[in-house]
Image (spheres, grey):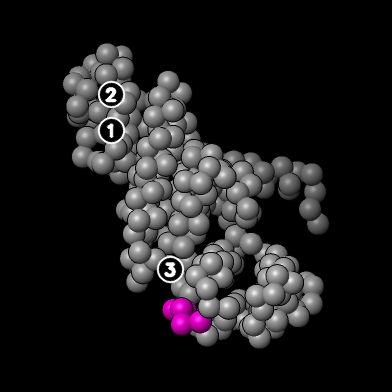
Amino acid sequence: MTDEVSVSSIRDVAALRYLDRIDTDAVVRWATEQLMGSSGSEGLLAIACESSPADSETVSRLLNELLVSMGEPSMDERRAGWIVARFLAKRIVDGSIEPSIGARKIWWDVANRIPDLEPRMRTFVALASEWEDDPVHRDEYERDIVEAARKLLAEPISAIS
Amino acid sequence: MITEGTASNVVDAVKLGRQLASEAQMSEEGTAIVGAGTDTDLRQAERLAQQYGGSSIDYMKMTSSSYQGSDGFQFETHWYQNGDGGIFEPKTKFPDNSNVGYK
C-alpha cells in the first residue's frame, strides 16, 4: 500500500471527508472496494469493518491514522481544501468534468469555504463567473479554466504546507 | 404549536434575511476578480464601455462577500464597475450542485 496512486486516493478521500463532501458510508464502501482490489492494509480493514451507518468521528479518525501511517501529514482544513482543489483540477484536465462545473466547485467548495486559499483560487471564481455572464466567450473561458487547472496541478502537493 | 401563520412568518423572516443580505452585499466595496488590477482579462470591457461609458481599461468585475444563512443557503453578488464607481449588471450567484463524484 505504498504506491503513489493509493496514497493519492487515500489523500483525496480523507480530504473530501474532512470537508464533509462525502459521507462516512461512502468512505466505508470505498475501503471495502480497495480491499477487494487486493490493495489492503490494517487501516483500510478497520474502516471497511465499520457498520452502517458508520460513526463519523471514528471513520475520520481511522482515515487520518491511515494517512499518518503512510508518512502523510495529518489532515487540516487548509490541506483538505488544497487537495480537493487538485482533485477537481485533475478532472477538469482529463475531461471527466466540464471546465465550468469544475471551476464553480472550486469557487464554492474551496475558495468560499477556506478564506486562506481564496487568493490562490480566485482565477477559477473569475472565469466561472464570466462563463456564466458572457455566453459569447464561453469557449475561451473553458480553455482558460483548463490552463488554470494545469497550473494548479503543476504546483507540488506540499505547496500550501 | 406551529400554526400555518407561524410557518408563514418563518418563511417571511428567511426571505427578509436574504433580501437584507443581498442589499448589504451591494453596498460592500467588493473585491476585484476580473479586469483592471487582476490576473484575468475582462473580455466584455469594450462592450461595457460602449454601453455605459468611460474607458474599457477601467472596467472590472467585483465580488461581494459570500452569505450563508442558518439553513445553509448561500449566495454572493457579482457586478461590473468602472473607474467612476458606477455599478452595472449586478447578479446573484449560487453554488453549483452538479455531481462531480461527491456531494
Provide the chain ID for the residue under circle 2.
Answer: B
Instruction: Between residue B80 and residue B99, name the one nearer to us.
Output: B99
Residue B51 placement, left or right of B1: left
In the rendered image, which quarter is residue A142 located in?
A: top left
At 63% from the left and 47% from the top, the residue drawn is: B99
- Secondary structure beneath disc 3? helix
At 66% from the left and 78% from the top, the residue drawn is: A40
Q: Which residues are magenta?
A: A70-74
Q: Are the residues under marks 3 and 1 on the same chain?
A: no
Q: Are marks 1 and 2 in contact (CB under 8 Å)?
A: yes
In the rendered image, which quarter is residue B32 located in?
A: top left
Residue B84 placement, left or right of A138: left
Judging by the rendered image, the residue that carries numbered circle 3 is A79
> Where residue B41 is drawn, which disc sits there?
1
Give the answer, above or below, for where B55 lies relative to A116.
above
At 52% from the left and 49% from the top, the residue drawn is: A91
Give the crowd class for mark 1: few <14, some 14-19, many >=20 residues within 10 Å.
some
Query: Mark 2 or mark 3, which is nearer to you?
Result: 3
Rounded to the nearest angstrom, the CA distance separating label 1 from label 2 is: 9 Å
In the rendered image, residue A64, in percent from the top left (x then y), is placed at 55, 79
Rounded to the nearest angstrom, the CA distance separating label 2 from label 3 is: 36 Å
In the rendered image, residue B86, in percent from the top left (x then y), is placed at 27, 27
Give the answer, above or below, for where A52 lies relative to B37.
below
- Secondary structure beneath disc 2? helix
Type of residue at label 2? Ala
Type of residue at label 3? Arg
Judging by the rendered image, the residue that carries numbered circle 2 is B45
Rounded to the nearest angstrom, the CA distance separating label 3 from label 1 is: 29 Å
Q: Are marks 3 and 1 in contact (CB under 8 Å)?
A: no
* Residue A155 falls within the magenta-colored stretch: no
Type of residue at label 1? Asp
